[in-house]
Image (cartoon, helix red, strand yellow):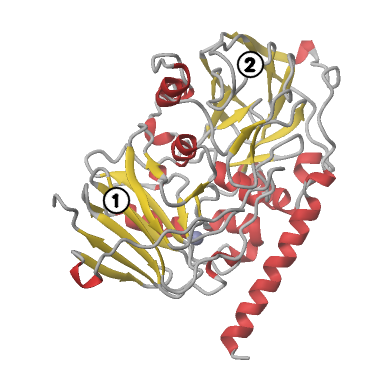
Amino acid sequence: MTDKARQIEALRRRYLELKAAGDQAAPKALPGATALDEAPLTTNLIRHRETVPGGWYWTARLKRGERLRIINTNATPGVAFFMWNADDTSERYNSADTMKLQWTAALPKGRVLFSDMGRVMTSIVEDTSGAHDTVVGGSTPASNAAKYGDGALRNSQENLRLAASKFGLGKRDLAPAISFFSPVSVDADGKFTWREGVTKPGDFVELRAEMNLLIALSNCPHPFSPGAYAPSDIEAVIWQGAPPLADDLCRTATAEAVRGFENTDPLFA
Amino acid sequence: MSIICTPAADLDPAAAAYDFTIPANRPWSHVVKAGQTLRIVDLEGCQAVDTLFYAAADFSERYSAQDTLLAQGSAYVTTGTKLMSNEGNVMLTVVADSCGRHDTSAGACSCEANTVRFGHHTRYMHACRENFVVELAKHGLTKRDIVPNINFFMNVPIDPHGGLAIVDGISVPGSHVDMVAAMDVLCVISNCPQVNNPCNGFDPTPVRILIWNGEAA
Ligand SMILES: [Zn+2]
């Protein structure tokens, strides 16, 4: 064996070890979905609560440690979401890193959402549906035109641009979004499929801010959701949950999350 | 998993308007005009070619992985895929593909992501987003303009439960992909320097870029 071949073999071995560790730490170790009546909100710790009408967008600033609960009151199929580091908006949500760093496109309770700087932006601390899509993202004028025959219906691409503009940000500051409550799967041939019956009225997802954040949210149906265009109210709640303990699920679920927090925490040391 | 390969159009490399070999690990950029055919050749096989496109007339219009996947309803790039912009316009169409499988979900490697994926000891290893920043700077663009890209010749299957991993590539020496530009586009490539996963067979190698003028050109 040549030196080069030996070097390639050593690198391959290390990769396979990491992959095996990642696979092993993957969904098996996660606790499963939150029940609808589990994790009640502590009402005196709520800082802000707002109803976002169907088709509309919403923005917020979250401080590290604060939580955002998005309540899908009427099981509207899809809430697109994007975020920036409030202290340096060049750092932002990165869908690709979020998937590859955790070896999965599935993002249920226990997973974290990564920035483009190898840091954790938010942890998914509660989640009743486990049905979130960050591969395909939100709707666009073209997808509404194709699906509903009306490109003028409100859509997530324009909503996220509107939300970004309210922070003084623009089109260049946007990148692929995540769509909550959007059960999209990839079949064996690579085709996207929508899993019916996965989301239900009252589903919620709760994100804990791991850095100071600017949040943009669009309450429009996912482009692959079946049925007519009928988004309805969702609720956005900002509240102060308990701080993470040393054995916090999201901080410790995988070796990758641990290293992600090792990159994040020094910003606040 | 069905992989459909289509042979290259009958294009003579000697007749190309542009012919350049990007060395292993290096960035590159060039404007491809509407109607021209861009070919990327994986000279030695199993080399990820991280690629971004910007509308030459307005760099704020750029390749969008999500618009591309949305338009075609499936997760991988191959013959027939229309590469879409963030304005919903077709930038290029893949017209031939001897490999049959290219990724646009997993994005480019970076020094920072490498620390999370492979350990903090990989912090100071050259990475695609370093290449992108250096090449984009020549056109007045910055890190802010980097979005999740296409990884030509990179195999990243997503299983029905969402599992995703970068696995051994299926490109062989001489594998190529042909695209016809629908608008003038700035093509920016990072010939991926990653050695910590199979995207480059743990051994980065050069790729060749050929551009032919279209019928109308
Ligand atoms: Zn790379």
Q: With respect to residue A85, does A231 lie above or below?
A: above
Residue situated in front as seen by the camera: B208 or B36: B36
Please report, as a chain letter, where disc 1 is located. Answer: B
Per the image, label 1 sits on a secondary structure element best described as: strand
Asked whether the viewer can see residue B133, the reply is yes
Please report, as a chain letter, where disc 2 is located. Answer: A
Q: Is mark 2 within 8 Å of ligand 1?
A: no
Classify the position of the N terminus of chain A by image quarter. Answer: bottom right
Does B162 sit left or right of A229 as displayed?
Answer: right
Q: What residue type is labelled 1?
A: Val
Place of residue A248 in the rendered image (x, y in percent of width and height, measured from the top left): 81, 39
Residue named by callout 2: A76
**Residue A241 location, quadrant:** top right
Does A106 sit left or right of A134 as displayed?
Answer: right
Q: What residue type is labelled 2?
A: Thr
Residue B180, disc: 1
Place of residue A220 in the rendered image (x, y in percent of width and height, measured from the top left): 54, 18
**Residue A132 location, quadrant:** top right
Q: With respect to residue A49, does B73 lie above or below?
A: below
The residue sitting at 42% across, 25% down in the picture is A161
Residue B151, disc: none
Place of residue A152 in the rendered image (x, y in percent of width and height, measured from the top left): 39, 14
Asked whether the viewer can see residue B27, the reply is no
Does A31 sit left or right of A126 as displayed?
Answer: right
Crowding at mark 1 (Cα within 10 Å: few <14, some 14-19, many 20+) = many
